[in-house]
Image (cartoon, rainbow, N blue to C red):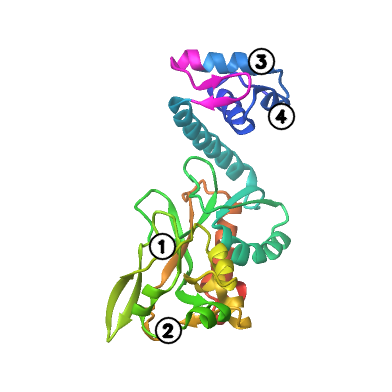
C-alpha cells in the first residue's frame, strides 16, 4: 500500500494514535517502525508542529495532534464512504460503525442485530456501547443513537422512538424507609441520580395541571441508567429512570413505580444520527431504515419488550 500521499500520512497517524505505539501500528500496516517514524516526522515537518510526544513508555497527542487526528479521521471516513458508494452498486457491504448508549444499546439495539445481519450478511456491524458522545464528523461512528433534543448541525437524523421516565424503588427499600405519597416526601428519601452534564438537577412533577420541579438528593450518582436500576433493585434508594431500562424489573415486581399520579409525562425523543447526502453508503441507509422499521412504528408494549 502506498503511504506517500497526505491520505497515507493521515492513515498512519490515525493508526499510531489508535494503537498507542509505533511498533504496533507498523505491524498492522505491514511497515517497519522506522518507516512509520520517518513518515510521522515528515508530516510534523510539513505542518511545522509536533503532533506526538514520544517517551519510552507511551505516546501522547499534543493539542495540535488531537486536532489533526479529528480531521484525519473525518477525511479518511469521507474517502472510504465515497469509494464504498462507488463500489457498492446498491449492495450494502463493509464495516458499519454504530454508537449507542450502554443501557439502550444492550436492551434495544443488540436484540435487533441478529435479524439485521441475517438480512445483510455482507455488512460488518461494529457496535460500540458507551455513554460518551461519538464524534460522527470526526469518523468515530457512522450511525449514533442519541436521546433528547438535537443541537443544530450538518448531520442528518431520523426519529426511531421516544421514552418516558418513571420513579422506582424496590419493595425492600419501601418496607424499610416508607413509601412516598406526594413528591415532597422525597426530601426524606435517598434519591439516586445521574451525574452527566445534561441531566437535570431536579425531578419534574405535575399537580393540578401545573408542572413543577423539586430538588432531590442522595448519596449515589451514576452515568448509567442500568446501574441506577440495579442499585434501586438492591434497595439503595429511589431512582427516576427511562421506562425502557426498568420494564422487566417492573413486570417482575423487583421494582415498584412511585408517584405516578404526579408523573408529568415528559417524553425524550430518540434519533439515529448520521452523515447524509448522495455519498451515504448503502450500509448506513439500510441500517437506519431497519431501525426506523423496527422501533419507530412499534407500540408501547413492543418497545417495552424490545427495551
Q: Is mark 2 in CB contact (under 8 Å) with mark 1?
A: no
Label 3 or label 4, whichever comes before in sequence order: 4
* Residue lying at 30% horizontally and 72% vertically, measured from the top left: 213
Nearer the viewer's eye, disc 3 or disc 2?
2
The Cα atoms of the two marked residues, 1 and 4, are separated by 39 Å
The Cα atoms of the two marked residues, 3 and 1, are separated by 46 Å
Density class for disc 1 (Cα within 10 Å; few <14, some 14-19, many ≥20) is few
Q: Position of residue 62 (x, y in %)?
A: 47, 25
Q: Which mark is residue 148?
A: 1
Density class for disc 3 (Cα within 10 Å; few <14, some 14-19, many ≥20) is few
Q: Which residue is mark 2?
A: 260
Q: Which residue is mark 4?
A: 28
Along the viewing direction, whichever of 109 and 164 lies nearer the viewer: 164
Label 2 or label 1, whichever comes before in sequence order: 1
* Residue lying at 59% horizontally and 61% vertically, measured from the top left: 105
Please report the bounds of the magenta region as a residue range.
Answer: 44-61
Vertical arrangement, residue 14 with respect to residue 188, above or below: above
Q: Is mark 2 in CB contact (under 8 Å) with mark 4?
A: no
Nearer the viewer's eye, disc 2 or disc 4?
2
Amino acid at each position: 500500500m502506498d503511504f506517500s500521499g497526505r491520505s497515507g500520512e493521515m492513515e498512519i497517524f490515525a493508526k499510531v494514535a489508535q494503537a498507542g505505539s509505533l511498533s504496533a501500528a507498523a505491524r498492522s500496516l505491514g511497515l517497519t517502525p522506522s518507516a512509520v517514524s520517518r513518515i510521522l516526522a515528515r508530516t510534523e515537518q510539513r505542518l511545522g508542529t509536533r503532533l506526538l510526544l514520544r517517551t519510552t513508555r507511551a505516546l501522547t497527542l499534543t493539542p495540535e495532534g488531537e486536532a489533526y487526528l479529528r480531521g484525519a479521521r473525518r477525511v479518511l471516513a469521507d474517502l472510504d464512504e465515497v469509494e464504498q458508494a462507488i463500489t457498492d452498486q446498491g449492495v450494502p457491504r463493509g464495516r458499519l460503525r454504530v454508537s449507542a448508549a450502554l443501557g439502550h444499546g444492550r436492551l434495544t439495539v443488540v436484540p435487533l442485530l441478529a435479524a439485521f445481519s441475517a438480512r445483510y450478511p455482507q455488512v460488518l456491524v461494529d457496535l460500540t456501547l458507551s455513554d460518551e458522545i461519538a464524534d460522527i464528523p470526526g469518523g468515530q461512528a457512522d450511525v449514533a443513537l442519541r436521546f433528547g433534543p438535537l443541537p443544530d448541525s450538518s448531520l442528518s437524523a431520523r426519529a426511531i422512538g421516544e421514552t418516558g421516565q418513571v420513579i422506582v424503588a424496590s419493595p425492600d427499600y419501601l418496607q424499610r424507609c416508607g413509601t412516598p405519597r406526594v413528591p415532597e416526601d422525597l426530601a426524606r428519601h435517598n434519591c439516586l441520580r445521574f451525574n452527566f452534564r445534561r441531566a437535570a438537577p431536579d425531578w419534574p412533577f405535575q399537580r393540578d395541571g401545573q408542572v413543577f420541579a423539586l430538588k432531590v438528593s442522595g448519596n449515589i450518582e451514576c452515568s448509567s441508567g442500568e446501574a441506577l436500576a440495579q442499585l434501586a433493585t438492591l434497595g439503595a434508594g429511589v431512582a427516576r429512570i427511562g421506562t425502557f431500562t426498568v420494564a422487566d424489573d417492573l413486570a417482575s415486581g423487583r421494582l415498584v413505580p412511585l408517584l405516578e399520579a404526579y408523573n408529568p409525562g415528559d417524553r425524550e425523543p430518540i434519533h439515529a444520527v448520521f452523515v447524509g447526502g448522495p455519498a451515504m453508503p448503502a450500509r448506513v441507509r439500510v441500517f437506519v431504515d431497519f431501525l426506523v422499521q423496527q422501533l419507530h412504528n412499534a407500540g408501547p408494549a413492543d418497545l417495552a419488550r424490545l427495551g
